[in-house]
């Protein structure tokens, strides 16, 4: 009786024998086709998945058998405080000095509405209409500030005015 495990029937009914090694090579070549791998994750996605898996394993080991959720939370907070302390030590305390009006306007202080109007007229005479409109808008806002209809605030935008 023949060994039917080594024989296959072709479409015409003739037996076809394929040895093991060539069949394995043919299968490997077929599976290397790009069509089978077009939906595989990218290298970046695989790296981020690997990192997330390791973080999840670390957090699971903290809160796993033998510890309670409170113990895991305390350990997590200790690590967070240590990281925050290292960043604080390395970068120092956050510092922010308040700016004064004098720093913004310079030594002469804020300009008057008349000075802005004079500059606007000079720009208009020279045909620089964009600058003329800008200076005229500044004159309008500064005039409202001088009449105390608006508070004096450096850096105010036209929309805010």
Image (tube, rainbow, N blue to C red):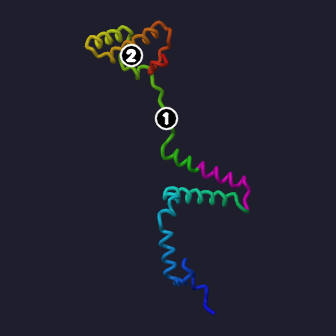
Residue drawn at x 39%, y 15% as measured from the top left: 110
Characterize the local packing of mark 2: few (<14), some (14-19) or many (20 or more) Cα atoms within 10 angstroms.
few
x, y percent for residue 9: 57, 81
Does residue 120 appear left or right of residue 38 in this picture? left
The image quadrant of residue 2 is bottom right
| Numbered badge on residue 109 | 2
**Position above or below: 132 against 5:** above
Which of the 4 quarters of the picture holds residue 126? top left
Mark 1, other Cα within 10 Å: few <14 / some 14–19 / many ≥20: few
Which residue is situated farthest in the bottom direction here? 1
Q: Is mark 1 on a helix, strand or loop?
A: loop
Residue 18 is situated, as x and y percent measured from the top left of the image, at 52, 83
Q: Earlier in the sequence, mark 1 or mark 2?
A: 1
Q: Residue at 50% of width from left, 12% of height from top?
A: 150
**Magenta region, residue range:** 66-81
Q: Which of 37 and 48 is in front in this view?
A: 37
Question: Is 3 situated left or right of 40 in this image?
Answer: right
Indicate left or right for 50 with 141 as reference: right
Of all residues shown, which one is farthest toward the front? 12
In-front residue for pair 79/50: 50
Q: Is mark 2 on a helix, strand or loop?
A: loop
Principal secondary structure, stretch drawn in magenta: helix
Q: Does the magenta stretch include residue 58?
A: no
- Residue, x 56% and y 50% (percent of image)? 83
Q: Residue 33 carries which label?
A: none
| Residue nearest the viewer, comparing 90 with 20 | 20
Which residue position holds label 1?
Answer: 95
Residue 79: x and y in percent read: 60, 52
The magenta stretch spans residue 72: yes
């Amino acid at each position: 009786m023949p060994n039917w495990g080594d024989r296959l029937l072709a479409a015409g009914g003739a037996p076809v024998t394929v040895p093991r090694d060539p069949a394995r090579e043919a299968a490997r070549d077929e599976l290397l086709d790009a069509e089978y791998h077009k939906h595989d994750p990218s290298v970046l996605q695989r790296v981020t998945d690997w990192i997330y898996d390791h973080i999840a394993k670390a957090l699971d080991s903290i809160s796993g058998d033998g510890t309670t959720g409170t113990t895991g939370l305390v350990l997590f907070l200790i690590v967070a405080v240590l990281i925050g302390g290292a960043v604080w030590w390395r970068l120092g305390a956050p510092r922010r000095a308040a700016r004064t009006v004098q720093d913004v306007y310079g030594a002469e202080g804020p300009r008057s509405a008349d000075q802005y109007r004079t500059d606007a007229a000079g720009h208009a005479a020279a045909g620089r209409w964009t600058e003329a409109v800008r200076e005229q808008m500044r004159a309008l806002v500064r005039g409202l500030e001088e009449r105390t209809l608006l508070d004096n605030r450096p850096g105010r935008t036209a929309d805010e005015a």
